[in-house]
Amino acid sequence: MANNNRPTLAAAWLAPCFALLAAIVPATAAADPPDLDPQPAPRVFAVPTAWLVPNGGTIATAGLSHRGEPFTAVSAGLGGVAELDLTFARRDGLWQPSALFKLGGSVAKLPVALGFRRSLAVSEKNAVLYGALTLASRPVLLHVAIEAWQAQERTRAGLPEVPLTVRPALGLEWNPWIAPRSTVLLDFGWKPRFADGGASLAWHGNWGVRVRIVQSMSLELGVEMRQDEAIDRPSVFVRLNRRAAASPRRSVSAR
């Protein structure tokens, strides 16, 4: 007879993760130097923001979920008005590399951005065009995006595909005063799924925390909920972000 009391794998991961979250907040409650305040990021967990990586700067992210799904991304700022991003991730047993080009600016003093991300995978293709707006009222940031998706499998013609579909996406960042180096993150968006039945568009939600470790490095701990998956089977992941600023130009003095 099957043992119905056996804890799920996600439950085994959630216990230590909640313990780590509980330890992070008190540990960061003391006053921090100004240079350790949270910095704007080009995305929450998955939902894009209207912020751009500064000109000449880069943000590298590497992480892993308890399902063994790696995530790696590198974003670079271009001229203070654009951003280029390359992402390599594994999801639902498939490698899903993609590239993003993003333009940003401000309208009525509000950050806005227009981005286009396209899959680089051989077996499937998907693309999303989005517009993003960030509303800032410290200590809360609200990110609103409108996304237009298309997705299709390349290897098997005739399977269902995702036609041009428009969906909203939301993200929230909260920097509590008791933990100046910590940012609580929530987001809700959409991602294509590729299975035996073809391509479909499914919702996903993420929640967790980002903690600034040093001036150029932060750690993220998050939980992802996915459509068509039981609430007790979330995906728990850890990511490390590394920022690099543009090198200052050195003047060449005459000999």
Image (tube, rainbow, N blue to C red):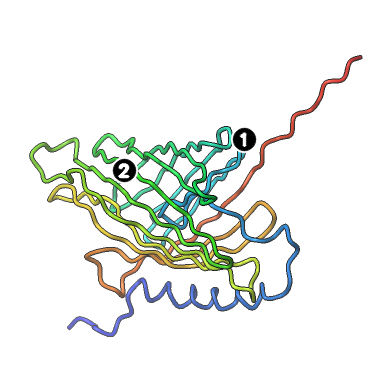
| Residue drawn where x is 41% and y is 43% of the image | 88
**Which disc number belongs to residue 128?**
2
The quadrant in which the C terminus is found is top right
Q: Looking at the picture, how far across and down is residue 37, in whole percent?
A: 67, 61
The quadrant in which the N terminus is found is: bottom left
Of the residues shown, which amino acid type is indicated by label 2? Answer: Val
| Secondary element at tag 2 | strand
Residue drawn at (17%, 44%) of the image: 163
Numbered disc total: 2
Identify the residue at image location x=35%, y=45%: 130
Q: Is residue 29 above or below residue 71?
A: below
Q: Quadrant of residue 189?
A: bottom left
Q: Is residue 228 above or below residue 52?
A: below
**Residue 28 horizontal side relative to residue 128, left or right:** right
The answer for how far apart the CA atoms under marks 1 and 2 are is 25 Å
Query: x%, y% of residue 81?
Result: 53, 36
Amino acid type assigned to the residue bearing label 1 in the image: Gly
Residue 75 in the image: state x and y as whole percent.
52, 41
Q: Return the residue at label 1.
A: 56
